[in-house]
C-alpha cells in the first residue's frame, strides 16, 4: 500500500494540517493501491504565505537565472520519466504509448518555457515609454486528473519563466504522479517558497486559492462548471484568470477526403487519451452522400481500436479514471440509445474479458446535433457521426456548440481545408492530423475557456505590462 502523507511548503516536505485520507484506485482493476493525506485550508494558507515571501526576490531575478532553473528542472524530470510512466499507468491506466508521451511532455515543458523566455523581450520601448513586462504575482495552479503531471509542469514552467511564485493544487486522484514530480522539483534546490504543492480537494484547497487575496492569478484546467465557479470566486479580488475548460470538438471530413485515411485519423482524434481529453474529436461530420461508406470504413478501422491492459503493446484505449467516470460514460451511452441513435460499435457494459473501469469504445450513427450525446462533454470513448449536405452546413454544425476548444478538418485539398478551418470557432484547428506544437497558443473560444497557454501567449498570461514614461532611455 502506497502512503503519501506529506505536502510541499516553503521548500520542505511537511506533514499537512489536514487529516483526511483519500483512497487511490488502480482503474484497471478498481482496487485500492494507496492513500494520500489531503491538505486543508490551513495548508493552503501556509503555502500562499511561503510563495508570497519568495515572490519579491524571484520576480527580480534575471532571465539567465530563470532559464538556468528551467533547464535544471527539465533534467531532473527527464531523469524520472520511467518512474512517471509507471505512476501514470498505475493510477490513471493510460496505454503505454500515451503514458510515455505524457511523461515526456511533463519534462519538455520546462525546456519549452526556457526557449520562449530566451526569445522574449521583457522590456521594450514604445513611444516615449519603457514598457516593462512585470511578474503578475503569486499564482494558483489547479490541475486535472487526465494529465496531472503534464499540467503541473507546463503551468509551473511558464509561471517561473515569468518570475512568478506558485501554489499548486493538483488532482487528489493523481497523487502518485504528483509525488514523482515533487521529488524532481525538490532536488532542483530552488529558493524556498518558489513553488508549493498541496494535495487537497477542490472545494477546500482550490476554494482557498480562489478566495485568498494573496493569490494574484489562477490558471485552471478542468470542467466548465468548475471553471465558472472559479471565475465567480476570483472576481471578488479581481484575480487574473486563465481557464482551459471542456470541449465537444468536431472532426469535419470533407467530401474530397480519402476515407481509408480519414476515418482512422478521426477515430484517433476521438479516442485519444482513452476519450478522457477535452480536445477529443467526439463529433465526426461526414457528407450525407458518403455515410454508408463512412460507416463501412469505421467498422473496419474500429478493429484496431483495442481496450485492454495499459502495458499491452496493441492497447489504444485504457480504462476510465474512476467508478464515477465509468458510470457517467455508461449513462451517456444509454442516453444515446434512448434518443434513437444507432450503435455502430461498442455499447453498454465492459469490453469482453475486462472489468475495472473499462468501457467499450462506442460509436453512434443517426445522431442529430440536438441530442445530448452530441452537445454535452462525455469525457470517455464515445463518438457521434453526424451528416451534412454541403460545406456551409458542415461549418454550421461544427460551430453549433457552446464549446470551442479544438477542431479537426480532413481533406485531400490543403487550401480547402484551411479555408474551412478559418471559419470554425475554436482555439485550435488541426488539419489532416498535424502534430501538437508546444510553441503555439492553446485555449478555447466560448465556454471552452479564457486565455491561452504555451509559447509567447502562455508566458504573457503571467505578466503585466507597466509603462514608465519620462525616464532616461536605456
Image (cartoon, helix red, strand yellow):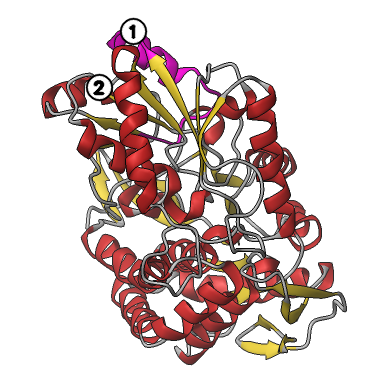
Q: Does residue 272 appear in the picture of this structure?
A: yes
The residue beneath circle 2 is 254
Give the magenta part as a residue range. Answer: 388-407
Q: At 31% from the left edge and 57% from the top edge, which residue is drawn?
A: 122
463 to 340, vertically: above or below? below
Give x and y (percent) for residue 121. Answer: 25, 56
> Residue farthest to the right?
19
Q: Is residue 397 depicted above or below 348 in this figure?
A: above
- Image-quadrant location for residue 354: bottom right
Image quarter (top left, top right, bottom left or bottom right) of the C terminus: bottom left
Residue at the front extreme, as displayed: 352
Residue 149 marker? none
- Pick the residue in front: 152 or 363: 363
Compute the Cα span from label 2 to label 1.
Answer: 11 Å
In this rendered view, identify the residue nearer to me: 53 or 160.
Answer: 160
Query: Relative to 257, is 388 on the left or the right?
Result: right
**Is residue 424 visible in this depiction of the protein?**
no
Locate residue 43, reporting x and y percent: 78, 74
Which residue in the protein does label 1 denote?
389
The answer to which quarter of the image holds residue 203 is: bottom right
Amino acid at each position: 500500500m502506497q502512503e503519501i502523507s506529506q505536502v510541499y511548503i516553503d521548500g520542505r516536505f511537511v506533514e499537512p494540517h489536514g487529516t483526511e485520507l483519500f483512497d487511490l484506485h488502480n482503474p484497471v482493476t478498481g482496487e485500492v493501491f494507496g492513500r494520500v493525506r489531503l491538505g486543508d485550508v490551513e495548508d493552503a494558507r501556509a503555502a500562499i504565505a511561503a510563495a508570497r515571501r519568495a515572490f519579491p526576490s524571484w520576480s527580480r531575478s534575471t532571465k539567465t537565472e530563470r532559464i538556468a532553473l528551467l533547464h535544471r528542472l527539465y533534467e531532473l524530470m527527464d531523469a524520472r520519466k520511467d518512474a512517471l510512466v509507471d505512476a501514470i499507468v498505475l493510477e490513471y491506466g493510460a496505454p503505454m504509448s500515451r503514458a510515455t508521451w505524457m511523461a515526456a511532455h511533463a519534462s519538455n515543458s520546462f525546456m519549452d518555457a526556457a526557449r520562449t523566455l530566451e526569445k522574449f523581450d521583457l522590456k521594450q520601448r514604445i513611444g516615449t515609454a519603457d514598457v516593462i513586462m512585470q511578474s503578475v504575482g503569486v499564482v494558483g495552479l489547479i490541475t486535472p486528473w487526465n494529465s496531472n503531471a503534464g499540467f503541473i509542469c507546463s503551468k509551473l514552467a511558464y509561471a517561473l519563466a515569468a518570475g512568478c511564485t506558485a501554489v499548486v493544487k493538483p488532482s487528489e486522484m493523481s497523487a502518485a504522479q504528483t509525488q514523482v514530480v515533487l521529488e524532481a522539483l525538490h532536488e532542483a534546490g530552488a529558493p524556498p517558497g518558489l513553488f508549493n504543492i498541496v494535495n487537497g480537494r477542490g472545494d477546500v484547497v482550490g476554494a482557498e486559492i480562489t478566495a485568498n487575496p494573496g493569490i494574484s492569478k489562477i490558471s485552471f484546467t478542468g470542467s466548465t462548471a468548475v471553471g465558472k465557479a472559479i471565475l465567480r470566486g476570483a472576481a471578488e479580488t479581481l484575480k487574473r484568470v486563465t481557464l482551459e475548460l471542456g470541449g465537444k470538438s468536431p472532426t469535419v471530413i470533407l467530401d474530397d477526403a480519402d476515407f481509408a485515411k480519414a476515418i482512422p485519423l478521426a477515430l484517433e482524434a476521438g479516442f485519444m487519451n482513452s476519450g478522457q481529453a477535452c480536445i477529443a474529436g467526439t463529433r465526426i461530420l461526414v457528407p450525407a452522400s458518403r455515410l454508408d461508406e463512412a460507416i463501412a470504413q469505421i467498422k473496419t478501422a474500429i478493429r484496431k481500436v483495442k481496450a485492454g491492459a495499459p502495458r499491452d503493446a496493441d492497447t489504444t484505449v485504457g480504462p476510465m479514471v474512476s467508478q464515477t467516470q465509468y458510470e457517467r460514460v455508461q449513462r451517456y451511452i444509454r442516453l444515446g440509445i434512448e434518443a434513437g441513435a444507432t450503435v455502430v460499435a461498442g455499447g453498454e457494459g465492459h469490453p469482453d474479458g475486462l472489468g475495472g473501469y473499462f468501457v467499450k469504445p462506442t460509436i453512434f450513427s443517426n445522431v442529430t446535433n440536438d441530442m445530448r450525446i452530441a452537445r454535452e462533454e462525455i469525457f470517455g470513448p464515445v463518438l457521434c457521426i453526424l451528416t451534412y449536405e454541403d460545406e456551409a452546413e458542415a461549418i454550421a454544425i461544427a460551430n453549433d456548440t457552446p464549446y470551442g476548444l479544438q477542431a479537426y478538418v480532413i481533406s485531400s485539398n490543403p487550401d480547402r481545408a484551411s479555408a474551412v478551418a478559418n471559419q470554425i470557432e475554436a482555439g485550435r484547428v488541426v488539419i489532416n492530423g498535424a502534430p501538437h506544437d508546444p510553441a503555439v497558443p492553446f485555449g478555447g473560444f466560448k465556454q471552452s475557456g479564457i486565455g491561452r497557454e504555451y509559447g509567447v501567449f502562455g508566458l504573457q498570461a503571467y505578466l503585466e505590462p507597466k509603462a514608465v514614461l519620462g525616464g532616461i532611455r536605456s
